[in-house]
Amino acid sequence: EAGVAQSPRYKIIEKRQSVAFWCNPISGHATLYWYQQILGQGPKLLIQFQNNGVVDDSQLPKDRFSAERLKGVDSTLKIQPAKLEDSAVYLCASSPQGAGETQYFGPGTRLLVL
Amino acid sequence: AQSVAQPEDQVNVAEGNPLTVKCTYSVSGNPYLFWYVQYPNRGLQFLLKYITGDNLVKGSYGFEAEFNKSQTSFHLKKPSALVSDSALYFCAGRTGRRALTFGSGTRLQVQP
């Protein structure tokens, strides 16, 4: 079974530029998550989708971050404009629908904002 | 509000010795608790989880964890550490279908 796919793996941009990350979850997984992991910290949720609907985006900085999951499969996370403090690893995870289900993580996209 | 704490930034252990990585949680309702491992430049790999039932949970690579409701703890253990176990370990918790709340991580260093 293929795992969660993410691209690109690395991205370097200058502040105020825009960037987009892509995630393809495990086939059949209804729930998709985007987490931000700043160096030295645990991942923090940005947004959670159930199929193509948003379940939780309370910690998403909506003035600069946006995400979509068209057709309830793959997802795109965008940052516009980027700030220095956005430098982090962006992790995508997916899980089957249901309480207590395991979340499986992709390899992440490492973003450096200069 | 949910929170997960990992009180140790780093744990050092000699190869062949038992290891323990500590985790305490504050989660309302019935918690689901997880351990993940992260190797450099890689995503998080699932090790084990507690949902309900037996308090001792066995997972991948010989790891196990004990759920202790009275102490609100979920410590990760392994009877005999390997050098290849050296990595960053994260404890995480959730309730229902919510996203995971992670601890800050513990770096495990196993010396040969």
Image (cartoon, helix red, strand yellow):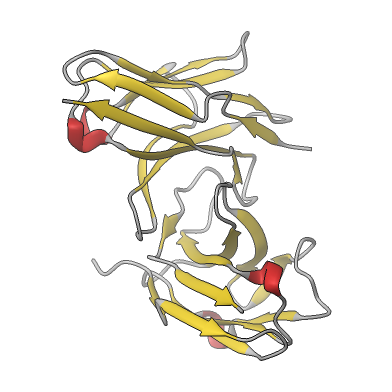
Q: Spot the residue most to the bottom.
A: A17
- In the image, residue B61 lies at what x, y percent? 21, 34
The residue positioned 18% from the left and 28% from the top of the image is B82
Above-or-below relation of B105 to B13: below
Residue A17 visible here: yes
Residue A31, quarter of picture: bottom right
Q: Quadrant of the C terminus of chain A?
A: bottom right
The residue positioned 81% from the left and 76% from the top of the image is A62
- In the image, residue B105 lies at what x, y percent? 51, 38
Image-based side of B61 in relation to B8, left or right = left
In the image, A67 versus B6, the foreground residue is B6
Q: Spot the residue most to the top.
A: B70
In the image, B20 versus B8, the foreground residue is B8
Above-or-below relation of A22 to A112: below
Q: Quadrant of the N terminus of chain A?
A: bottom left
The residue positioned 83% from the left and 79% from the top of the image is A63
- In the image, residue B44 lies at what x, y percent? 40, 52
Residue A13, quarter of picture: bottom right
Q: Spot the residue most to the front.
A: A114
- In the image, residue B74 lies at what x, y percent? 50, 22
